[in-house]
Amino acid sequence: MSDWLVWILLLAGVGVVVALLIASIKVLREWERGVILRLGRLQKVRGPGLTFIIPVVDRLYRVDLRVITLDVTQQRIITHDNVSVEVDAVVFYQIRDAAKSVVAVENFQKAAFFITQTTLRDVLGQSELDDLLARREVINQRLQVIIDKATEPWGIKIIAVEVRDVRLPETMQRAMARQAEAEREKRARVLLAEGEFMASERLTEAGAKISQQPVALQLRYLETLTEIAAEKNSTILFPVPIDILQGLTDLLNRRAN
């Protein structure tokens, strides 16, 4: 065998060794963990930092431990009171057990999406429209508990579930607008009636007090004449009660005597 062929084989061997050495070195970032399967058997979870694997024999799965946002696209749902609405939601979850997320489920992101979509349909389908609009926090909490229970065997923790948008049909929007307008008109009529009732009570009390003191009625009458005279420039004729004329006559007679 010639020398140049030996050198070629030697360089090839060195190259293979270097390639295997490079392939065996893995760097896991702070938020990553490495799940290693050696000949199909689960090994200890590695990371973060520098770790080594056996090329060809080991297979490394990188798992992100940061909070992940899962967007559940808009879908049509029929509520318990037979109202068709379009709802979309967002789920915040985090992997707490890296090994389970690889071994227990084939694709945890896809599985989390479908379990969220199914649970969203079930929970909202059992809720009425008024609850969906007014008690959304309660529904979000219920969704979180159910989804978290389903994803716990996969090593996934559901942090929060938020129903973002609820779109109603146009006919339902117009009906709700009419209902809100009728409710506002009802409150306005009730307030007006209460005001009239309170005013009538005050007038009744005032009449009772004036009836006990006839002089007060005369003074009120004269005060009204003064106010009208100050505002009007034209001549105004008012009927004068007989008791007022009688009082003036008595006053003039006393002065004459």
Image: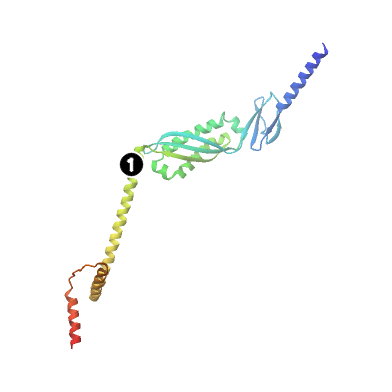
Residue 85 occupies which quadrant of the picture? top left
Image quadrant containing the N terminus = top right
At x 47%, y 40%, the residue is 164
Query: At which x and y percent is residue 213?
Result: 24, 75
Closer to the camera in the image, 129 or 232: 232
Query: At which x and y percent is residue 168?
Result: 39, 38
Q: Is residue 32 above or below residue 194?
A: above
At x 30%, y 59%, the residue is 194
Q: In the image, 164: left or right of 156?
A: left
Q: Is label 1 in a helix, a strand or a loop?
A: helix
Name the residue furthest front: 233
Query: At which x and y percent is residue 86?
Result: 42, 36
Q: In this view, does 250 lie above or below 106?
A: below
At x 36%, y 40%, the residue is 173
Q: What colouring does the structure picture have? A: rainbow
Image quadrant containing the C terminus = bottom left
Name the residue furthest top: 1
Q: In the image, 53: left or right of 232?
A: right
Residue 17 occupies which quadrant of the picture? top right
Circle 1 crowding by C-alpha within 10 Å: few under 14, some 14–19, many from 20: few
Closer to the camera in the image, 184 or 26: 184
Number of numbered discs present? 1
Name the residue furthest right: 3
Q: In this view, does 245 lie above or below 123?
A: below
Closer to the camera in the image, 38 or 195: 195
At x 54%, y 35%, the residue is 151
Query: At which x and y percent is residue 112?
Result: 53, 33
Which residue matches tag 1? Answer: 175
Which amino acid is tagged 1? Ala
Name the residue furthest bottom: 257
